[in-house]
Image (tube, rainbow, N blue to C red):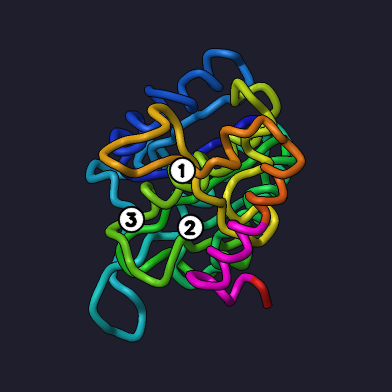
Amino acid sequence: MRIDIITVLPELLKSPFEASILKRAIEKDLVEIHLHNLRDYTSGNYKQVDDYQFGGGAGMVMMIEPIDKCISHLKAEREYDEVIYMTPDGESLNQGIANQISLKENLIILCGHYKGVDQRVRDMHVTREISIGDYVLSGGELAAAVLCDAVIRLLPGVLNDETSALTDTFQDNLLAPPVYTRPSEYKGMEVPKILLSGDFPKIEKWREEQALERTQKRRPDLLQ
């Protein structure tokens, strides 16, 4: 998979890809991450990427020309499955969407700023708009990092145990059951005996029951 991220703050996006699972995925050549500074596609000495909005109002708008130049340059080099715009008014990211995107080969992720991008960018280039929640960030970089993390960990070979991703919370519209590790007793709190029994069919049944119970209590909306 190749992911091209368009941003005005490339330095903000470097560290998430320099540690842990994402770093290993890049080192294994399972994913390529390319950061593109939008200011490199501007004209003039001031490298301007934003301007006042027509019709008045508070807040600046990201200009169409540098974004169009950047996306058009990338599209001239290869075909892209999706051009994703990170925006608070996009569809809410969930595990199903992450699963879908993990099957793609080439992605462009556009990070918004200010009051957003010129609507013509969305009309001309964007194929999918994604939000990571009903709140507003200073820019789309952190949201792009969240999306990349959710997607990349699903790629075959990224996790040491590929079945781990299949049992994550939300994969089957259930929250994950409680988990335990050593020691089996700590300050009077004991691990459920079923988990120490070695009876794996019963353990799986217990986990399913616990997952359902936890979901009913905490996120009953998922069961609908």
Name the N-terminal-most of marks 3 and 1: 1
Position of residue 99 measured from the top left corner of the image (x, y, whole percent): 69, 48
> Circles 1 and 2: CB distance less than 8 Å?
no
Name the N-terminal-most of marks 1 and 2: 1
- Residue 98: assigned label: none
Name the N-terminal-most of marks 2 and 3: 2
Q: Distance between the residues labelled 1 and 2?
A: 11 Å
| Quarter occupied by residue 185 | top left
18 horizontally vs 163: left or right = left
Question: Which is closer to the viewer, label 1 or label 2?
Answer: 2
Position of residue 124 measured from the top left corner of the image (x, y, whole percent): 63, 62
Front residue (pair 54, 144):
144
Position of residue 57 measured from the top left corner of the image (x, y, whole percent): 27, 83
Which amino acid, by three-letter code, is at mark 3? Gly
Q: Distance between the residues labelled 2 and 3?
A: 9 Å
- Above or below residue 41? Residue 115 is below
Which amino acid, by three-letter code, is at mark 1? Ile
141 horizontally vs 155: left or right = left
Instruction: Write the start and end of the magenta stretch as one range.
Output: 209-222
44 horizontally vs 173: left or right = left
Q: How far apart are marks 3 and 1 (CA)?
A: 12 Å
Residue behind mark 3: 139
- Residue 86: assigned label: 2
Question: Which residue is depicted at the point 48% across and 57% down?
Answer: 86
Q: Local crowd at mark 1 within 10 Å, few (<14), some, or many (≥20)?
A: many
Residue behind mark 1: 6
Which amino acid, by three-letter code, is at mark 2? Met
